[in-house]
Image (cartoon, rainbow, N blue to C red):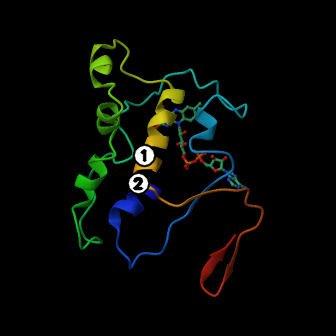
Amino acid sequence: MGAKRACLRDRRLPECVVIERHEIGAHWTGQYHYTDGLQCLVTPPEHDIGFPYKSRSFFSAQADIDSEMHTLSWSAYLADSKQSVDWLHRLDKYPTHKEFVKYLKWVHDRSEFPLKIANVDKISVADGNWRL
Ligand SMILES: Cc1cc2nc3c(=O)[nH]c(=O)nc-3n(C[C@H](O)[C@H](O)[C@H](O)COP(=O)(O)OP(=O)(O)OC[C@H]3O[C@@H](n4cnc5c(N)ncnc54)[C@H](O)[C@@H]3O)c2cc1C
């Protein structure tokens, strides 16, 4: 959601801040006692954060949203981290959850959407805004 919001770049939309207790993709890292991180995704990695790339341009007065999202795709990540060739030769085309977290962190670094590491203990509405 944060990446899509960053791609929209439309100032008429409300600000979007992602709040995580630990880190991006925390439960897929193998830490925090939820998964071991070593199991493979059950969905192809091409089902990435922009998938299924059917955004409409309605909200954005600027570039096409899907084109922007493609710059944050799994294949863009492989190319940027120089893993494309290795990946093409790899027999198992499903990354582990831990590997996919690296992609999710790359998306954050690249799109720079606001991320706050914090524990939310109360949510309310004040003056038409969320108050956490
Ligand atoms: C073992 C397993 C394997 C899976 N494999 C796949 C797969 O291969 N492909 C696929 O598409 N889907 C898979 N899924 C499903 C996928 O993980 C979820 O659909 C997806 O993570 C949901 O995303 P989310 O952002 O809504 O929630 P989450 O990913 O659960 O994110 C919620 C975040 O909020 C944080 N949080 C919670 N409470 C607070 C608080 N009070 N304050 C601050 N932060 C808080 C949590 O720490 C967490 O990081 C899998 C799920 C599991 C459990």
Identify whether 22 is placed above or below 131: above
What quarter of the picture does the C terminus occupy?
A: bottom right
Place residue 37 in its image quadrant. top right
Q: Are marks 2 and 1 in contact (CB under 8 Å)?
A: yes
Disc 1 residue crowd, few under 14, some 14–19, many 20+, Cα 10 Å: many
Residue 4 x/y as whole percent: 39, 58
Q: Which residue is mark 2?
A: 111
Image mark count: 2
Disc 2 residue crowd, few under 14, some 14–19, many 20+, Cα 10 Å: some
Ligand 1 is located in which of the four quadrants?
Answer: top right
Three-letter amino acid code of the residue under disc 1: Val
For label 1, the SS is: helix
Residue 48 x/y as whole percent: 37, 40
Q: Which one is nearer the viewer's eye here, 120 or 114?
A: 114
Place residue 119 in its image quadrant. bottom right
For label 2, the SS is: helix
Residue occupying the far bottom of the picture: 127
Three-letter amino acid code of the residue under disc 2: Ser
Can residue 66 be seen in the rendering of this structure? yes
Q: Which one is nearer the viewer's eye here, 102 or 64?
A: 102
Identify whether 126 is placed above or below 103: below
Q: Which residue is mark 1?
A: 107
Residue 80 x/y as whole percent: 32, 35
